Amino acid sequence: MLPIKELTPVEKEIDVLLGKSAFYLQTYRAIDALNMLQQAREMAETNEVNSQIRAVIYRNMGQAQFQSGKFDDAMSNFILSYETFEDENDKAAAAGLIADYYLQAGKCEEAHGYANKALGLAKAPELMAHPYQIMGGIAIEEGDYPKALELMNKAAEKAEEAHCITDLAMIIMDISVIFVKMGKLETALSEMFRAERYVKECRNWDLYLRCAIRRAKVLYKMGRDEEAKKLVCALEEHKR
């Protein structure tokens, strides 16, 4: 949601709709989110509305469409959002989001292009970490593991500089994946323990669960089945 005191009456109405859409997106109720966003978009198209609000409408519509499996429609709105934002940091964040979704879709060339745009625009270190992480992900897809490590370490450096602990943990988890692919399982396990330290610091149970499951997988690959089983059982017990 945007600062209410800076909004016109129409923009305030749109902001309420955006807040509702954000809640629906968090709970994966994409159809409900789209209903709110369509109303917001219609109001924005028939009234004088600032560019930031328009950009947020397009971005949220893209997220709702992505949740609904409408990839092409989602990307069109994400790109429209990127083009509508005027602030360079906002544009950098939007470009990073586009790059991330393209990477998830296996479209590495498009992902690399928008990751480069994000890096060119970003002024704050927290906005630089994500593009470097995406570029590292592209290098993983291409099988260039030394390059992937270089880029992921750069991402980790930027995340640590910005004190983005959750981002740092996820980047280190990606670094562990690279070492697994390189067959360096001891190093991969060490990286998972390092990631867990940061996960515990940010107290994110969902991320801790993902981290622990990945550690169990590394242990299985190392032939340490009993340790892996104990870890999985401990997780199951904790969930109860």
Image (cartoon, rainbow, N blue to C red):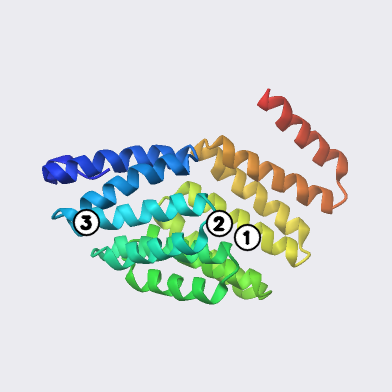
Q: Position of residue 27 (x, y in %)?
A: 48, 37
Position of residue 184 in the picture relative to residue 169 (left or right): right
Residue 129 visible in the current orientation = no
The numbered dot on residue 45 is 3
Residue 19 versus residue 97: which sits nearer the camera? Answer: 19
Q: Quadrant of the N terminus?
A: top left
Check disc 2 and report the residue beneath it: 171
Q: Residue at x 50, y 74 (%)?
A: 110
Q: Nearer the viewer, mark 3 or mark 1?
A: 3
Residue 180 versus residue 108: which sits nearer the camera? Answer: 108
Residue 218 visible in the current orientation = yes
Helix, strand or loop under label 3: helix
Residue at the top extreme, as displayed: 240
Check disc 1 and report the residue beneath it: 175
Dot 1 surroundings within 10 Å: few (below 14), some, or many (20 or more)?
many
Residue 155 versus residue 61: which sits nearer the camera? Answer: 61
Q: Quadrant of the C terminus?
A: top right
Name the residue type under label 2. Answer: Ile
Name the residue type under label 1. Answer: Ile
* Sequence-first disc among 2 and 3: 3
